[in-house]
Image: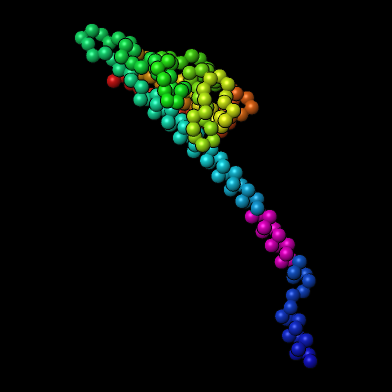
Amino acid sequence: MRSLNHRLNVSGFALLEVVITSAIATTIAAGSCILLSMAIDASRHARTRTVATMLAARKMEQLRSLRWTHVSTAAPALSMSSSDVTTDLSNDPATDDGPGLLRSPPGTLTSNIDGYVDYIDGTGRWAGRGPTAAAAAVYIRRWAVQPGAGDPDNLLVFEVVVGTRGDDPSLLGDSIHLVSMEARK
């Protein structure tokens, strides 16, 4: 009889063992939930920055594709004479009623200035332009064209800033800032 009782006690769990095991399992589960929450936030943040980077690169390529060359004549080069000074890249598709590669007014990277800002929805599609963000806008894309400091007649500096829409229109959340230069051809 003694061996039967001994065998029953050995094969079962004591209440203290069950409580300790439950506490360990609960701690692991809580830690996993926190870790999962952090992973979801990091994934959302990475997606936002990836989309913003792609939108900035797309606008930079549009700016860099505009014609900026000298006229091929025997006379000295004419400033901007064969360059694009009419394309409006704030429309989708671009139209011929904008500033092209003319010098941007001050503040185009920090505020929504018509002709230098457009809005993109959450799927990456164009959602409008102008000083006020469209209702569907998730991303705000701003750009500036400035002459290069070292050689203003032959060098342009393009800057594009893309960020998420926030409460303050002058501030962009989680923004990407690209800078490129273009020399006359």
Relative to residue 74, is residue 78 drawn left or right? right
Inspect this view and state whether residue 77 appears: yes
Q: Residue furthest top?
A: 75
Question: Does 130 appear above or below 27?
Answer: above
Question: Does 125 appear above or below 169?
Answer: below
Residue stretch rendered in magenta on the structure: 20-32
Q: Residue at x 53, y 41 (%)?
A: 46
The image quarter in which residue 182 lies: top left
Q: Residue at x 77, y 74 (%)?
A: 14
Could you tell me residue 136's position as x and y percent? 57, 30
Q: Residue furthest left?
A: 74
Q: Residue furthest bottom?
A: 1
Could you tell me residue 128's position as x and y percent? 52, 25
Front residue of this view, candidates 115 and 166: 115
Task: Tell me the quadrant of the picture where the C terminus can be found.
Answer: top left
Question: Does 176 appear above or below 78?
Answer: below
Relative to residue 183, is residue 99 drawn left or right? right
> Is most of the magenta stretch helix, strand or loop?
helix
Q: Residue at x 26, y 13 (%)?
A: 71
Front residue of this view, candidates 117 and 182: 117
Q: Residue at x 53, y 20 (%)?
A: 130
Residue 150 included in the magenta stretch of the image: no
Relative to residue 33, is residue 143 drawn left or right? left
How many numbered tags mark residues here? Answer: 0
Could you tell me residue 149's position as x and y percent? 40, 16
The image quarter in which residue 165 lies: top right
